[in-house]
Each structure stands twice: as C-alpha cells, then as structure tokens.
Image (cartoon, rainbow, N blue to C red):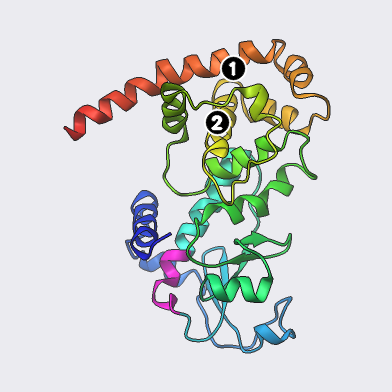
Amino acid sequence: MTRRFRLYIFLAVCLFFGCSGKDKSQKENAGTSGNQSFTHIYQNRGPYKGWERYRFLDIVLIHPPDHPQQDHFEDIAKIFSALVKRTSTFLKITPPDSIIIYFYTGVGHGMTVTGRDTPFSDGTVIHFWFPSFYGPPIVKHLLPLWYQGEPEHEFLKHGIIALLDGSGQNYHLETLKFIDSGTYIPLRRLSVDTTINVDFERYQSAEAASFVDYIVYAYDIGFLKILYASKGSFSGDVESTFHMPVASLERQWQVFLKIIVAPKKDSLKKLTK
C-alpha cells in the first residue's frame, strides 16, 4: 500500500466518520495524557520499556516516544472509536469501556517486535501499525464478545472482518463485478475455500462480506450467528437455519444485488458523468 493510498484511506475514513472536526467539550472529557507512569501488560518487556500512553474517548494508544503519527493521535483515536461503535452495533454487543492499542511506528517495527505480518488482537490488546486498514483488528478483538470459538464455516468470519474493515469499499458492488465478469465464486465453493484470508486479499473475502451483510439485512444478525455457530456441513446448516437449500439462498442474495444494489451503481455512474 503506497503512502498516497494510505493517506487517502485515512482522509476518507475521517470524512466518513466526521473526525476532522475538533469537539472541545469531547476533548476535555476524554482525559488525554502522555509520558506518565502507567501500567500495561507488556510494561516490563524490553521492546516496550519507555512507551507512553495517549487516551482519547474509549481508546488508549500505547506508543513509543516521538511516534511519527503523534500529531494525528486524536483523529486516529476517533476513527478507532467510531469503528468500535459500528462493529458493536452490527454484532449487537455491548462495547468494552476501553480498548488498548499498541501502536507501532511502522510495518517493520510491528513485524519485528510481534513476529506477525499484519495488525492483530491477542485477546487482551490490539497491536496496530500502518499501512493497514483500521477495522480488521477491531473486529477480531470484538468477535469473541459475540461468539466464543472459531466457526466451522470460516469464510463467514473473514466476511464479517472485511465488511467492517473501515476501508469504505462497497463489497456488494465488487461482488456484482465478479458476477458480470464471470469470476464469481459459487457459494458452495466459497464456503469450503481454504485460501480465503482477509488479511491479504479482497476477492473471496469481498464476496463473503457481501453475503454476511445480505444475511443480516434480510434475516437479522441472529440468523448469521446461528449459521456461524453451526458445526455441520454448510449445505446442511443452511437448510436447518433458513429452511431452504444453498442454491435458493444464493439466488435470493444475487437477486438482492441485482435489484437493490445494481440500480445504485448505475445512479453513481450517472452522477460521475
């Protein structure tokens, strides 16, 4: 991801969530702080000695001194906070009072210290660095509050993470493009695809995002949770949950895309001409 693209994503999300404005009363109530003594779970480990804390709203950023993004901490915290609310609303869960985010100086720093390729949640705190979408580690952190354990149908988890990634991408439109171009992956294949990985692609996970959003739109999050928690075959679990075969549910999803989403896509084309 280039520096320009990263900046574009940052500004786009700022505009979407209205984070560019400074709300004085909100800031005064936030209790921001930095370079003070505090306790955190990695405090006594070598790579984290001397790290500082910045708090805004429900977000606590633990960061090295002189972090290159320190002038933007408030906006970054606002984005994270908005995504916590958005994810919690989607999943219908109560958000935590606060979320701790270890904010590394860049991809090299993050990978070297954590040994991981992408930002993640370790179940207690989030580890984050740029260039990355803001949403995925937030969703991974909050999913256990919705359902404990890993789903049998793993593509559903990747779909939820992609859907709430904060990138501003419309995965319904992407799925329509796949259908129109002949690159669409049928649901029976997508449900057993072992190459899907939301941290590195937006092909299979784009379709998965569209599918899970359709289920919530058409049926409610409760039905998605039943399917998410099911441990049988995908076809069998779909039939027991929705009382129809996979092919029928897939047709309903595609009709939704063509009738509800496609006209909006055409309207956007006209506006840009």
Tell me which secondary structure the magenta stretch mostly adopts. Answer: helix
Determine whether the residue tagged by mark 2 lies in a helix, strand or loop: helix
Give the quarter of the figure containing the N terminus.
bottom left
Magenta residue check for 106: no
* The label number, if any, that marks residue 250 in the structure image: 1
To which residue does mark 2 refer?
Answer: 213
Q: Residue at x 68, y 70 (%)?
A: 115
Quadrant of the image containing the C terminus? top left
Residue 139 percent location from the top left of the image = 61, 50
Is 216 left or right of 115, judged from the image as shown? left
Residue 70 within the segment the image draws in magenta: yes
Q: In the image, residue 239 lies at what x, y percent?
A: 74, 14
Residue at screen point 45% across, 21% down? 257
Between the C-alphas of marks 1 and 2, the distance is 13 Å
Residue extending furthest right?
A: 232
Instruction: Please report the residue visible at 52 percent of the width from the left and 80 percent of the height from the top.
Output: 33
- Tell me: 251 left or right of 238: left
Q: Amino acid at mark 1?
A: Glu
Direction left: furthest residue: 273
Please provide the residue range marked out in magenta: 68-76
Image quarter of residue 169: top left
Q: Is residue 214 left or right of residue 39?
A: left
Q: Nearer the viewer, residue 54 or 8?
A: 8
Q: Residue at x 59, y 28 (%)?
A: 216
Compared to 8, does 92 lie above or below?
Answer: above
Disc assigned to residue 122: none
Q: Are there few (<14), some (14-19), or many (20+) residues within 10 Å of tag 1? A: some
Give the x, y percent position of residue 90: 58, 39
Q: Nearer the viewer, residue 176 or 261?
A: 176
Please tell me which residue lies in front, 201 or 36: 201
